[in-house]
């Protein structure tokens, strides 16, 4: 199969990781073999799981499988606001960044393409930015009975009229915090008059997939991340 594509520079990631990164998009009119791939230290591609011919073509030019991703969709029509939820503020950033840096160490930002500490560093910055309204628009906290942070979820509005979860984490598993965070995210979407909430998770994260299914999420699409 003749596959054409283009490469989009990833300027923010390049600066953050100190690695010249690009994103290969399966659009455009340049043949894969003619793309300036050697101009980049790392090229990322996200390909829908059903596009087997394109996946094979990327493998032929040196791309390697990194991680699978599943996207879930929820309806916010019947969302109910849970108790113990509040908006994260700037004073919460140090604690949230520290927790995110510890929890999100298993991700596609892994060796041998990235340094061991890069994944935690990346997600620590992500949650800081979410509190500040950068990229994600808001971060919500779930509090335990003593008022301490039990989990967090970051959210953003999309141009297609839906909402998307950025990060979601329960600090102590088995306490119902994950379900409460999903409910809070759905309530946020409903308050924004967004009827659909989406969240993506790694295929290797079975606990997250079980949570989203229990909360009414419907698997909507699957994709593979590949690097070269």
Image (cartoon, helix red, strand yellow):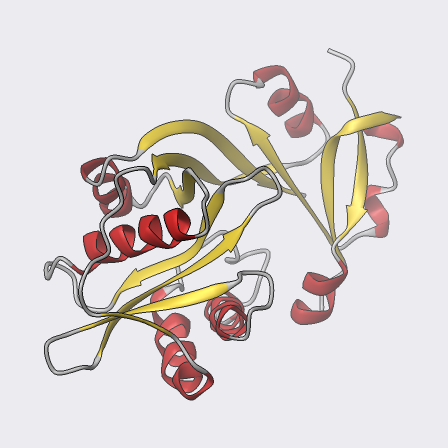
In the rendered image, the vertical position of residue 102 relative to residue 2, given as above or below:
below
Q: Which residue is at the front of the view, 38 or 199?
A: 199
Task: Classify residue 71 by image quadrant.
Answer: top left
Q: Residue at x 39, y 75 (%)?
A: 88
Q: Is residue 151 something that shows in the picture? A: yes
Q: Quadrant of the N terminus?
A: top right
Residue at 45% x, 29% y is 222
Q: Position of residue 137 (x, y in %)?
A: 53, 62
Determine the image quadrant of residue 94: bottom left
Quarter in which the C terminus is drawn: top right
Residue 65, percent from left and from top = 53, 37
Residue 39: x percent and y percent? Answer: 86, 50
* Numbered label tally: 0
Q: Is residue 31 visible?
A: no
Q: Quadrant of residue 89?
A: bottom left
Residue 4 appears left or right of 164: right
Look at the picture and state if 206 lies above or below 183. above
Q: Residue furthest top?
A: 1
Residue 50 as seen in the image, left or right of residue 27: left
On the image, the x and y values in percent for residue 217 come to 29, 35
Q: Residue at 80% of width from left, 41% of height from top?
A: 7
């Amino acid at each position: 199969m003749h596959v054409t594509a283009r490469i989009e520079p990833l300027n923010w990631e390049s600066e953050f990781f100190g690695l010249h990164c690009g994103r290969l998009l399966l659009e455009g009119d340049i043949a894969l073999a003619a793309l300036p791939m050697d101009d980049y230290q790392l090229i990322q591609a996200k390909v829908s799981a059903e596009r087997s011919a394109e996946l094979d073509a990327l493998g032929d030019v040196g791309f390697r499988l990194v991680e699978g991703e599943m996207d879930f969709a929820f309806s916010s029509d019947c969302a109910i606001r849970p108790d113990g939820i509040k908006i994260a503020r700037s004073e919460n950033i140090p604690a949230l960044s520290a927790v995110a840096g510890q929890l999100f160490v298993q991700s596609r930002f892994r060796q041998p393409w990235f340094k061991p500490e890069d994944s935690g560093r990346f997600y620590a910055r992500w949650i800081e930015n979410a509190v500040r309204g950068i990229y994600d628009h808001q971060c919500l906290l779930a509090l335990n009975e003593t008022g301490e942070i039990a989990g967090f979820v970051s959210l953003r509005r999309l141009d297609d009229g839906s909402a998307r979860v950025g990060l979601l984490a329960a600090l102590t598993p088995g306490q119902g915090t994950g379900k409460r965070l999903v409910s809070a995210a759905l309530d946020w979407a409903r308050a924004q008059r967004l009827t659909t909430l989406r969240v993506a998770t790694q295929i290797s994260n079975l606990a997250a997939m079980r949570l989203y299914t229990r909360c009414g999420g419907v698997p909507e699409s699957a994709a593979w991340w590949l690097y070269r």
